[in-house]
Image (cartoon, grey):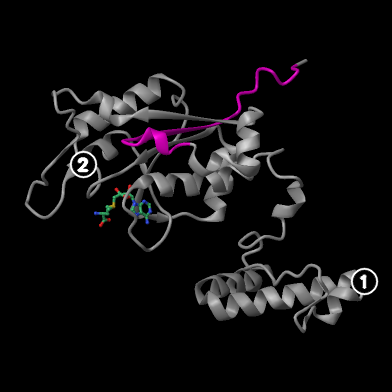
């Protein structure tokens, strides 16, 4: 019988020009404790260490003209091959980019249930397309805005995955009612004091009537989703129609 010692922890490998940015915020709080406890691991591959010239160049000007610089395919390829030969051999390669598919809780859940992720962090204007194609990289965005580099985006994605690893958060039940889990945003939350500067807690939450509280929270979640995220609301209504 296995005592669990042969089960590999969930792994994150970041391919980056700034390895010192990892684990960054993920070295703190619950993710940091879980990292220390060996529930997940974080490695980095320094892309610049695969440069071959004396200036350790990793980028060049874009063919076709235009502003900025592009990360060279030959250098990035060496970094990816090195990662694959090491701890990232069985991990999906994800390139963080604003033009990628938006990261969703559903994709995060899939990634968290797998062996981990190898994350390629872009800098400058991005990475030469050929090396992304050659390695079948999945392109993922963390939102419709442009960051200065992929490292923060990678930390966001890894954070979202790590908190779903069993044992990282106090209670796995706490995921069930979170935003996106039921296709809805979360209902409003309240804690003590019951009266804060004249602002009181909705009476229903003090009633002790669990079924009514559940119904109220559900109504609130629906109202917030309808108002703030028409795209999610439409999908939620369509799913409900399909169920009936
Ligand atoms: N030229 C790119 C474009 O217009 O899509 C933006 C490049 S950005 C300045 C540099 C790097 O930051 C990208 O290669 C990517 O790795 C990362 N990045 C920026 N915004 C991101 C986002 N919203 N999601 C994921 N990665 C992002």
Q: Nearer the viewer, residue 38 or 213?
A: 38
Query: Helix, strand or loop at disc 2?
Result: loop
Q: Position of residue 216 (x, y in %)?
A: 78, 77
- Mark 2 sits on what residue? 128
Query: Looking at the picture, does residue 46 appear above or below residue 228?
Result: above
Instruction: Identify the image quadrant of residue 225.
Output: bottom right
Image quadrant holding the C terminus, namely bottom right
Query: Looking at the picture, does residue 74 appear above or below residue 1?
Result: below
Q: Range of the magenta residues? A: 2-22
Residue that sits furthest to the bottom in the current view: 198
- Mark 1 sits on what residue? 208
Residue 158 painted magenta: no
| Residue at x-position 66% and y-position 67% | 186
| Residue at x-position 60% and y-position 32% | 35
Residue 20 painted magenta: yes
Q: Nearer the viewer, residue 106 or 178?
A: 178
Which callout, 1 or 2, points to the residue nearer the camera? Answer: 1
- Is the CB atom of the residue marked by disc 1 within 8 angstroms of ligand 1's nearest atom? no
Residue that sits furthest to the left in the current view: 64
Query: Helix, strand or loop at disc 1?
Result: loop
């Amino acid at each position: 019988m296995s005592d669990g010692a042969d089960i590999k922890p969930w792994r994150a490998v970041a391919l980056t020009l700034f390895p010192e940015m990892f684990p960054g915020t993920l070295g703190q709080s619950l993710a940091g404790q879980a990292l220390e406890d060996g529930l997940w691991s974080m490695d980095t591959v320094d892309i610049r260490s695969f440069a071959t010239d004396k200036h350790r160049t990793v980028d060049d000007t874009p063919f076709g003209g235009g502003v900025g610089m592009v990360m060279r395919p030959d250098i990035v390829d060496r970094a990816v091959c090195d990662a694959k030969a090491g701890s990232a051999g069985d991990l999906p390669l994800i390139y963080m980019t604003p033009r990628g598919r938006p990261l969703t809780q559903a994709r995060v859940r899939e990634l968290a249930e797998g062996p981990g992720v190898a994350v390629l962090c872009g800098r400058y204007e991005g990475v030469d397309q050929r090396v992304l194609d050659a390695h079948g990289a999945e392109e993922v965005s963390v939102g419709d805005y442009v960051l200065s580099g992929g490292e923060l985006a990678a930390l966001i994605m890894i954070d979202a995955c790590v908190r779903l690893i069993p044992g990282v958060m106090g209670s796995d039940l706490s995921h069930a009612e979170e935003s996106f889990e039921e296709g809805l945003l979360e209902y409003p939350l309240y804690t003590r004091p019951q009266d804060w500067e004249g602002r009181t807690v909705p009476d229903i939450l003090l009633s002790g009537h669990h079924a009514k509280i559940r119904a109220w929270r559900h109504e609130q979640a629906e109202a917030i989703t309808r108002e703030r995220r028409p795209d999610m609301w439409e999908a939620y209504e369509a799913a409900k129609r399909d169920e009936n």
